[in-house]
Image: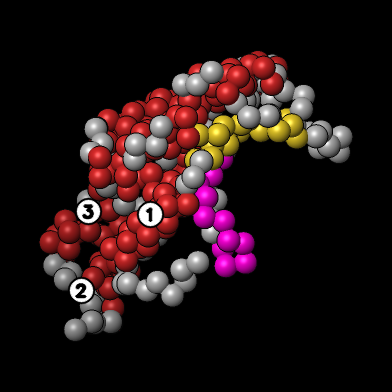
Amino acid sequence: MAHSPGKYTDFERLRERAVALRRAGHSLRQIRDELKIYNNDVLNQLVKGEPPPAWTKRPMAKDDLRDRARELRLQGWTYNEIQTELGCSKSSISLWVRDLPHPEPRCTPEEQRARMNAGLARLRESQDRERAATKQSAAAAIGSLSDRELFITGVALYWAEGTKDKPHVRRESVEFVNSDPGMISVFLAWLDLLNVTRDRLHCRVMIHESADTDAAESYWADLVGIDRALLGKTILKKHNPKTVRKNTGSTYRGCLGIKVRQGADLYRRIEGAWYGIVGAATAPDLRNRT
C-alpha cells in the first residue's frame, strides 16, 4: 500500500540524507536499506532530480558496435561497407552515425559505374551458374526412357504442336512443325518407335527470306538423316519492313515441317492415345473430343 511523504515526519531531513547518499554513489536499494524507506514512491521522491551513479547504468549490448560504426564512418566508410564489416543492420548504423558528416566520394562517377557494372556481371554469372546447375540436375534425373514413356511423351508432344482434325476441317493427317531441334529430334525418335520409316516423311523448311536458306536446309536434312535433295520446296516468309527481326544470326534456321504420308490411321491412334492420357489423368470426360 502506497504512503504519502507526510507519513515520514521529517521528509526534508530524509531527503538531505538521501541526496547525500545518492551523490556518494549509492544505488536506490542501498539508500532504501540505509534509511529504511521501503515505499518506492517515497524513495523516488527523496532522490528526485539526482542522476543515478554511472556504475548502476546497465551497459548496452551494442555499445561496442556503435562506437566501432562511428569510428568507421569518420574514416569515410559507406553504410554497405560498415554493414559488411560489423554484421549489423543498416537501420542501426543510420541511427548511430546520422549526426556525423557524410564521407567524401572515394571514386569518380565513371569509377562508380564501372564498379556497379562489375558487381552486376558477377551477380549474373552467379545466377547463370545456378540456372545451369538446376537444369543439369533436372536432366540427370530423367535418365533413360522406356518405350512406353517415349510413346506417351510423343503423343503429348504431337497434341501440343501438331496439326489436329477439327469438325469444320476434316484432315486426319500427321503434320508437325517446329523450330526447336530438340522437339524435332524427340518427334523423330517417336516415329522410329512407331516404325514410321524416313521414306514416309515429307520434310520442308520454312524460313525468312533474308536468312541463309542453304545452311538451314543442310542443317535440317542432316538432323532428319535424309539427303538435302529430298526436302520439299522451302517456304520463304516475306519481309515486313515495319518490323524489326530478332530471330537472326547463325543459330536461326527457321522451322522444319514434317508430314507423314498415308498418316490417317496414325493420326487416329494419336488422338485416341491422347484422350486415353486425359482419361487416366482426370475424371473421364471426352465430351470435348474433336
Could you tell me which residue is drawn at 25 percent across and 40 percent down?
Answer: 147
* Residue identifier under label 2: 39
Residue 168 located within the stretch drawn in magenta: yes
- Which residue type carries mark 2? Asn
On the image, the x and y values in percent for residue 90 come to 47, 39
Marks 2 and 1: in contact by CB < 8 Å? no
Magenta span: 166-177
Nearer-the-camera pick, 12 or 31: 31
- Which residue type carries mark 1? Arg
Nearer-the-camera pick, 83 or 19: 83
Sequence-wise, the earlier of marks 3 and 2 is 3
* Residue identifier under label 3: 27
Nearer-the-camera pick, 157 or 233: 233
On the image, the x and y values in percent for residue 50 come to 36, 56
Whether residue 122 is visible:
no
Sequence-wise, the earlier of marks 1 and 2 is 2
Single out the mark in the foreground, 1 or 2. Answer: 1
